[in-house]
Image (cartoon, helix red, strand yellow):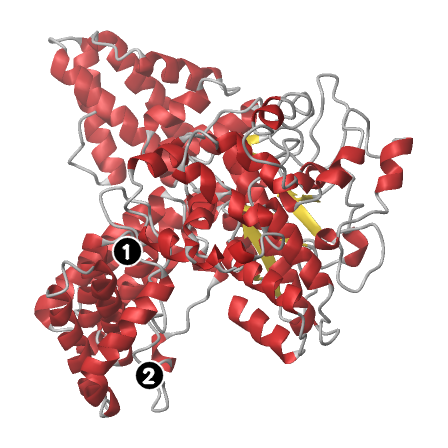
């Protein structure tokens, strides 16, 4: 996106030196636009470290910062003429000499003498703005704010080059990247995602989150004009709505309304009235949680200062987002990244926006091309590009025991060296077996690069890519497994692609290696079930059936048919839960809803302890009693027998299907436990009879112990 943006800017022939400087700042400083400076990476990904962690790390490892040292050598030229960039030269000083650190802030605002004014601004401005609504927002000198404003001002001067979506989308992407970077910084500092309409103790609404983000975008003076303890439409604040910053303005509209809104709702990352703590995103991470979206409907745009955004409707998840010619909308995740999301599947959007669903954004935002269409005779096999042709090795799982993926720029540079080694083979790679040979050689070559992680990662990614071009599922699997052993990669998405790719090229998998692909399919099926990823479950069942049919494995096909039936029942109950905005993690005030969620955990996920948390708060006395009694772990066989009787009665009264079988199965487990602990008695005889009846009704003879 950044490259396209710079080429576009060059094509306009804007021969302005200050503007060129601002463009260079935008490339190096904007995280969402592709910036890769160490400070920007830290701001985007290190959300859990303490505020002083970066400063302490800088003191502990001054010699390790090789790249910043090389980068810092550039300001020696401006040193001859100090006026152009006083603010840029002030920041490196605290890292080199910790004591004069307070002098960095006054240096950014006014080039006063360094020794004496340093102590005064450090004490004075720090306290007065603090009582405002947001803590860090009113502090002067927010890191990166001036750079962002400079980029915004530069973008104002550049013509769009057309009124169509393709032209305006490029600018929208750049502006949303700046807002996303500022929002990610605010989230990192406050450890929470802002509410769309924050309220005071009396429930009174004030100003939009967009207003409180102004200092992070460099609009400190505009922010100071607002009365933070007054509503957005008070006499003072309503006048300021006409001063809409360019970064919030809607392309093609000259008014006080914006199409940049938070996606809000009780199941979303952002809520209406209260900020969402980062810790609440248990099954997600910041880079998978959509926070801000671009509205497509001009009529739905709110006044930019008004605490109003887009309310998520699970019955119509694409509401407000449809209408773009390319059938895609731009979305920003909580780490500040901009994503191009297609509006093709309502279920996908529901799974994406409900943060209790663990899902990787790449499953939705990037729809991979089918492998069969990738290896056409005219396919480019350049070694310079390290991106796989499909099923990308996407973002990382942040496994602390593994290395993070090296930056793309470094991998591309390493790929150029690899091209010299394999350029002859690449020229002659006009057939699948020759491409497979290149992949095999690169895999072997990667073994000799253990001490050079960048080159090793580049070799493995290129091997992965050539294995896809060669239609070799085995080599694709081997390349990814080597990547996964050492680097932080998204295993679910890539394993899903390996299984899918293998099913479409099953004739190329040797018989002795087929069990490896079945094992991967079984592993990710269990993960998809645990994550309630129903589209993935459906696809895995289809792929598994195809594998089993190719081997005439009737037993596996019958098992998959049973899994499919159970999955359809689980999907139906899950959709009913989502339609009521219910959380699968925390009980709500909705007693009927708690019963639905509790049954879902018990029946479809066999997690009875989790289900009991909800059943205790349901409106069914029998379920409450059984949940409460089970949680006491009774040792008395008579109480165990009563629990079994309770589940049996509920099971017999339930309609045939998963619910009935699961409750009867739970009763059988307690009958078995009470029978083992009881001496001869009427209850013991009854328990043995009920166990025989359970086997007659369900055909299950092997009853697992509790």
Q: Secondary structure at mark 2?
A: loop
Residue 195, relative to residue 152: is it above or below? above
| Side of 526 where 511 appears, left or right | left
Which residue is depicted at the point 11% across and 65% down?
447
> Quadrant of the image for the C terminus?
top left
What whole-number distance in Å separates the C-alpha atoms at marks 1 and 2? 32 Å
Sequence-wise first label, 1 or 2: 2
Give the percent coordinates (x, y) of residue 1: 53, 67
Give the percent coordinates (x, y) of residue 369: 41, 73
Which residue is depicted at the point 62% across and 51% down?
148
Circle nearer the viewer, 1 or 2: 2
Residue 45, relative to residue 374: is it above or below? above
Residue designated by label 1: 560
Residue 414, relative to residue 216: is it above or below? below
Q: Which residue ends up furthest to the right in the rendered image?
A: 235
Dot 2 surroundings within 10 Å: few (below 14), some, or many (20 or more)? some
**Disc 1 and disc 2 in contact, CB within 8 angstroms:** no
Residue designated by label 2: 375
Give the percent coordinates (x, y) of residue 550: 20, 72
**Numbered label tally:** 2
**Residue 41 versus residue 595: which sits nearer the camera?**
41
| Side of 265 where 184 appears, left or right | left
Residue 664 seen in the figure: yes
Residue 317 seen in the figure: no
Give the percent coordinates (x, y) of residue 452: 19, 60
Q: Secondary structure at mark 1?
A: helix
Dot 1 surroundings within 10 Å: few (below 14), some, or many (20 or more)? some
Could you say which disc has been placed on residue 24 in the image? none
Which residue is depicted at the point 48% across and 56% down?
75
Which residue is depicted at the point 43% across and 20% down?
623
């Amino acid at each position: 996106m950044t490259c396209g943006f710079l080429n576009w800017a060059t094509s306009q022939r804007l021969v302005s030196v200050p503007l060129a400087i601002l463009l260079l700042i935008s490339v190096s400083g904007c995280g969402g636009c592709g910036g890769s400076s160490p400070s920007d990476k830290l701001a985007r990904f290190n959300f859990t470290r303490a505020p002083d962690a970066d400063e302490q790390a800088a003191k502990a490892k001054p010699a390790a910062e090789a790249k910043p040292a090389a980068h810092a050598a550039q300001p020696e030229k401006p040193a001859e003429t100090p006026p152009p960039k006083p603010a840029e030269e002030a920041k490196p000083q605290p890292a080199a000499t910790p004591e004069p650190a307070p002098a960095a802030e006054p240096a950014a605002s006014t080039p006063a003498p360094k020794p004496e004014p340093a102590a005064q601004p450090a004490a004075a401005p720090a306290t007065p703005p603090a009582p405002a609504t947001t803590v860090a927002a009113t502090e002067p000198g927010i890191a990166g704010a001036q750079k962002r404003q400079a980029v915004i001002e530069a973008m104002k001067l550049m013509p769009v080059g057309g009124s169509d979506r393709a032209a305006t989308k490029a600018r929208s992407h750049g502006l949303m990247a700046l807002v996303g970077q500022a929002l990610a910084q605010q989230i990192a500092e406050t450890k929470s995602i802002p509410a769309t309409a924050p309220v005071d103790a009396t429930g009174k609404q004030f100003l939009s989150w967009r207003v409180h983000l102004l200092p992070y975008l460099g609009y400190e003076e505009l922010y100071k004009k607002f009365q933070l303890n007054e509503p957005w439409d008070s006499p003072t604040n309503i006048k300021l709505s006409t001063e809409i910053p360019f970064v919030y303005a809607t392309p093609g509209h000259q008014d006080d309304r914006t199409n940049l809104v938070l996606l809000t709702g009780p199941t979303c990352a952002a809520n209406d009235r209260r900020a969402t703590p980062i810790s609440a995103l248990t099954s997600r991470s910041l880079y998978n949680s959509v926070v801000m979206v671009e509205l497509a409907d001009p009529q739905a745009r709110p006044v930019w200062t008004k605490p109003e955004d887009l309310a998520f409707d699970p019955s119509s998840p694409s509401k407000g987002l449809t209408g773009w010619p390319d059938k895609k909308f731009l979305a920003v995740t909580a780490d500040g990244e901009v994503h191009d999301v297609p509006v093709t599947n309502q279920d996908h959007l529901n799974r994406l926006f409900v943060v209790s669903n663990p899902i990787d954004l790449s499953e939705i935002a990037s729809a991979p091309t089918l492998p069969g269409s990738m290896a056409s005779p005219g396919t480019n096999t350049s070694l310079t590009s390290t991106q796989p042709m499909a099923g990308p090795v996407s973002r990382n799982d942040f496994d602390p025991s593994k290395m993070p993926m090296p930056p793309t720029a470094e991998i591309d540079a390493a790929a150029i060296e690899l091209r010299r080694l394999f350029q002859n083979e690449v020229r002659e790679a006009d057939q699948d077996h020759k491409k497979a040979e290149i992949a095999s050689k690169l895999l072997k070559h990667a073994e000799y690069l253990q001490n050079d992680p960048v080159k090793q990662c580049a070799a493995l990614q290129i091997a992965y890519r050539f294995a896809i071009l060669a239609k070799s599922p085995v080599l694709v699997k081997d390349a990814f497994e080597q990547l996964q052993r050492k680097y932080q990669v998204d295993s679910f998405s890539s394993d899903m692609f390996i299984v899918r790719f293998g099913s479409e090229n099953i004739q190329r998998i040797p018989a002795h290696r087929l069990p490896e692909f079945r094992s991967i399919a079984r592993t990710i099926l269990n993960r998809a079930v645990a994550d309630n990823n129903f589209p993935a479950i459906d696809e895995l069942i289809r792929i598994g059936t195809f594998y089993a049919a190719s081997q005439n494995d009737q037993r596996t096909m019958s098992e998959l048919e049973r899994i499919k039936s159970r999955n359809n029942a689980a999907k139906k109950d899950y959709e009913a839960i989502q339609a009521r905005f219910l959380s699968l993690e925390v009980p709500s005030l909705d007693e009927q809803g708690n019963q639905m969620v509790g049954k879902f955990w018990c029946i479809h996920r066999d997690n009875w302890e989790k289900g009991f948390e909800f059943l205790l708060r349901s409106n069914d006395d029998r379920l409450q009693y059984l949940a409460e009694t089970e949680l006491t772990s009774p040792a008395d066989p008579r109480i165990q027998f009563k629990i079994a009787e309770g589940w049996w009665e509920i099971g017999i009264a339930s309609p045939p299907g998963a619910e009935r079988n699961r409750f009867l199965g739970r009763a059988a487990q307690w009958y078995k436990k009470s029978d083992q602990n009881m001496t001869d008695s009427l209850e013991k005889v009854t328990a043995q009879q009920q166990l025989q009846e359970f086997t007659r009704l369900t055909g299950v003879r092997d009853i697992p112990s509790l």
